[in-house]
Amino acid sequence: MPWRMGLILGGARSGKTRLALRIGQAFPAPRFYLATAEADPADPEFQARIERHRRDRQDAWHTIETGFDLAESLTRLPRAAQIAVVDCLTLWLSRLVAREASDGHILQQVDGLLEAVARCPAPVVFVSSEVGLGVVPMTPVGRRFRDMAGWLHQRFAEQADWVVFAVAGLPVWLKGDAGLVLGPSTAPP
């Protein structure tokens, strides 16, 4: 296997998930999509977003609605799994922060997730929102979330074989070989 773990970062509507699915489509079935979003019946707009993502994947992906134990979900994928896309790390992190987990506990969960990648039967593409480029949040919990996301991204980027920053639907390669991931005919110049 040419790579084990990739990370796609970007802002809202930057094309992160579309790129992750495009990379995943290059792998034979079975493909697994691990969704960290949790639908809230009181939020129809967010439910519509989740449904749009499901339609985008169609039947080409096995979807797993994962909870807090994302690491266990990765390690329990069937041995036949060819690729796993985790979308998205910042939603997973926001749920941990909302539970008022300590920084130490969150970083322990991050390290456990990184360790799970080695036990996952397939390569893994992580999608995550870059939140550190905007204004400084006005609330302590907002600043804590932004800081934790930055630390999470640094840890994942250090371990990843490749890292991409998606901007306006275009991949900007920060680490790794685009030709290795996308194939020589589709890699950007």
Image (cartoon, helix red, strand yellow):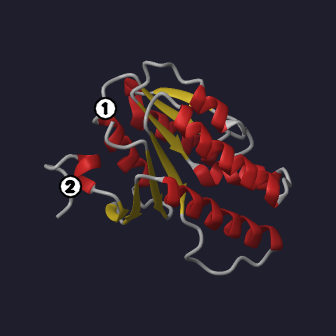
User: Closer to the N terminus: mark 1 or mark 2?
Assistant: 1
Residue 112 shows which numbered tag?
A: none
- Is 18 placed above or below 74 here? below
Q: Name the spot of residue 47 as percent of width and height, x first.
A: 61, 41
User: To which residue does mark 2 refer?
Assistant: 187
The quadrant where residue 15 appears: bottom left
Q: How far apart are marks 1 and 2 (CA)?
A: 16 Å
Q: Name the spot of residue 134 as percent of width and height, x first.
A: 58, 77
Work out whether residue 16 can be spotted: yes
Residue plotted at (20% across, 46% down): 183
Residue plotted at (42% across, 61% down): 14
The amino acid on which the numbered mark 2 sits, given as a three-letter code, is Ala
- 180 vs 128, left or right, is left
The quadrant where residue 113 appears: top right
- Is 121 placed above or below 48 here? above
Residue plotted at (28% across, 36% down): 26
* Residue closest to the eye, 148 or 112: 112
Residue plotted at (51% across, 54% down): 159
User: To which residue does mark 1 refer?
Assistant: 27
